[in-house]
Image (cartoon, helix red, strand yellow):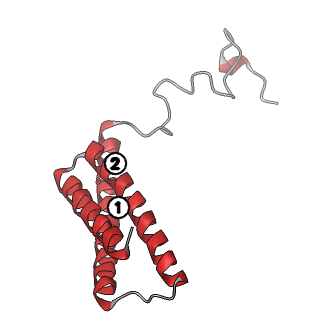
Amino acid sequence: MTLEESLSAVEQRIEQVSAALLAADPLSLEKHSTALRDAAADFSRALEQAAARGMPLPASLQKRADAIRTMLTLHRDSLARLAAVTDRQAAGLLPPSNAASTYGDGLGARGAAPGVARIYRSAG
């Protein structure tokens, strides 16, 4: 695969990931993110092969690669915001896991033996 083809594949996958982010479609986002990772790995291999042959990256491809870098930064920021919103929504629906139980610790480590009230345990 040439540099041009591999870079075009990355650009296409970035557009698909962008559409999935805008649609808030988690299944599509996962599928396209995996495809983007694979396309980026292919592009990286193509860059390494070109560098091994002593071929510099053309200026037009460098500009496109810079645009991809910018878009990936935006995607990372969007995903971080989406994760924060999701965490806040989950916290509103579910009680915190470290909150004390309403009726005590249940079967916690410091609980008394079954059938023995705490007031009858020795303090020592």
Q: Position of residue 55 (x, y in %)?
A: 45, 87
Of the residues tagged 1 and 2, which is closer to the observer? 2
The quarter holding residue 5 reads bottom left
Is mark 1 in CB contact (under 8 Å) with mark 2?
no
Q: Where is residue 90 in the image (x, y as percent from the top left)?
A: 33, 42
Q: Is residue 116 above or below residue 7?
A: above
Q: Which amino acid does label 1 sit on?
A: Ala
Q: Please, what secondary structure does the residue beneath circle 2 have?
A: helix
How many numbered badges does the structure rendering display?
A: 2
| 112, 78: nearer the viewer | 78
Which image quarter: residue 61? bottom left
> Please, is residue 6 above or below residue 101 in the view?
below
Is disc 2 surrounded by few (<14), some (14 to 19) or many (20+) residues within 10 Å?
few
The residue depicted at 77 percent of the width and 29 percent of the height is 123
Name the quarter where the C terminus is drawn.
top right
Residue displayed at 66% across by 8% down: 115
- C-alpha span from label 1 to label 2: 15 Å
Q: Which of marks 1 and 2 is nearer the N terminus?
A: 2
Query: Residue at label 2?
Result: 30
Report which residue position mark 1 lands on: 80
- Spot occupied by residue 116 in the image (x, y as percentages of width and height): 69, 12
Amino acid found under the numbered disc labelled 2: Glu
